Amino acid sequence: MKKLKFVSLMIAALFMGFGFTSCEEDDSILTSGEDEEVELNIAEGDNSAVTTIYVSDLEPGATSADVTVNFTSADSKMRRLYMTQNIAGAGYEKYELEIDGLDTKGDGSIDLSSGEGYDFTFTIPFPVLSGMTEGTVEYQLWATSGRGDYRDVENSLVSGPGKVIIDYGGTNPATSPVKEYTAKILAAPLADGSSETFISLIDGELYRIDQGEEYAAYWDFGYYYGASGDIANHGPSLASTSTYEETFQVNAGTSIVDVDGIAGTSDLNNCFFALSTMSATEFDAIETTNDLEVIATPTGQSINSLEINDVIEFEDNYGNKGVIKVVDIVGTYELGDYIELDIKVQ
C-alpha cells in the first residue's frame, strides 16, 4: 500500500498527521513507499467493522489516538467520507475533523474526489476527551458515492459504516440529556430564499433556502406567517421542509417560495407536529431523552395560529421526538419579522 499525499489542500493536514493512502496514483498526488498498518478495514456492503481503543492503554496525558482505517469498494466510487460521534450513549451527532487545509464539502463531509475512488486509507486522530472519566465515545465512519446524510447512513452508501470506539472504562449513563437549542430565531421567509427560515435539529443551526442542495439534508422545518388568501387564518406557522412550498401558498398551486427550485432538490425532510397540552413550566422541566418518549407520533406536517408560550410536540424525519416552546413572535411577514423558539429533542 502506498501512502498518497494530496499536494495542495491536503498539505496542512498531512503535517498534523492526517494521512491519506490509496492503491493507485494520479497527477494530483505524490507517493512514497511507506506501508500502513491498517487497524480497521471497512468494505463495500460490510457494516460490522469495529476497533476499540482503551484509554487506559494510552500514554498518560494523551490527547488523541491515531487509527488507520482502510476503505474499499468493488463497484462504486467513493466520493465522500462521513463521520458521526456518540458520547456516552447520548446518540450519534455530526462530527467534523478540525484540521487546517482539509478538503471538505459544504455539509462537512470529507471530499474524496482527488483519489481514484475504490481504495483509500486514512490515519485519523480521534480525540481523548479531557473531561470524560468513564463510558465510551463511538465514531461511525462511512463512504458515499455522493451527497449523503449524517442522520441516514444508507443515503448514497458505498462502504461501511465502521466503528471506532474510545473506551474510558466503566459504563455509560442509563439516561441521556436532551439536546437543547434556545433563542432560535427563524426569520419570516423572503421569496428569493435568502432569509434564515429553516432550522436543523441535528445541531440547532439556521439555514437559508438559497444555500442549496449541499445543506438540504439538514433542514427539518421552517417558519412562515399566513395573512392573506388561502392562508389568511394561518398566522404564525411551522411546516416541514418537504411540505413547506405547498403549505405556504396564498393561492392554491402558486408557490410563494420555490423551495425545490431554489434548493435544487425535492429530496427534503418530513417533520410532524401537534399542539401539546404541556405547559411552559412542564417544558422547562424536561431534561432527559426518556422524558420525551411519552410523545405520540403526530400526523400533521404543519401547525398554525401559534401563540407565545405554546408548546408543540414533534417527531422528525429520523424518528427523534421533541418539544418546541414559542418564546416570541415579532411582526408578520415583513423583512425583519420572526418567531423565536426554544427546542428540546432526543
Image (tube, helix red, strand yellow):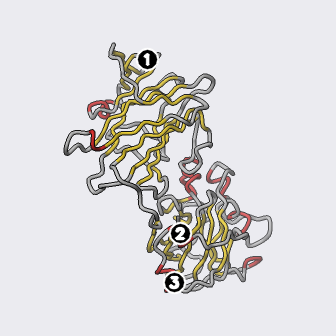
The amino acid on which the numbered mark 3 sits, given as a three-letter code, is: Glu
Label 2: how many residues lie within 10 Å, few (<14), some (14-19) or many (20+)? Answer: some
- Write down the residue under mark 2: 290
- Write down the residue under mark 1: 27
> How far across and how far down the image is residue 255, in percent?
72, 64
Q: Which of 341 and 202 is in front in this view?
A: 202
Label 1: how many residues lie within 10 Å, few (<14), some (14-19) or many (20+)? Answer: few
Q: Is residue 61 left or right of residue 139?
A: left
Residue in the image at 43% along x and 26% along y: 121
> How far across and how far down the image is residue 316, in percent?
62, 62
Q: Identify the mark at residue 282; answer none if there is no mark.
A: 3
Q: Is residue 15 visible?
A: yes
**Helix, strand or loop status at disc 1:** loop
Indicate whether 207 appears above or below 109.
Answer: below
Q: The N terminus appears in which quarter of the rendering?
A: top left
Residue in the image at 53% along x and 38% along y: 161
> How far across and how far down the image is residue 169, in percent?
34, 50
The amino acid on which the numbered mark 2 sits, given as a three-letter code, is: Asn
Looking at the rendering, which quadrant does residue 183 occupy? bottom left
Q: Earlier in the sequence, mark 1 or mark 3?
A: 1
Indicate whether 341 appears above or below 220.
Answer: below
**Helix, strand or loop status at disc 3:** helix
Q: Earlier in the sequence, mark 1 or mark 2?
A: 1
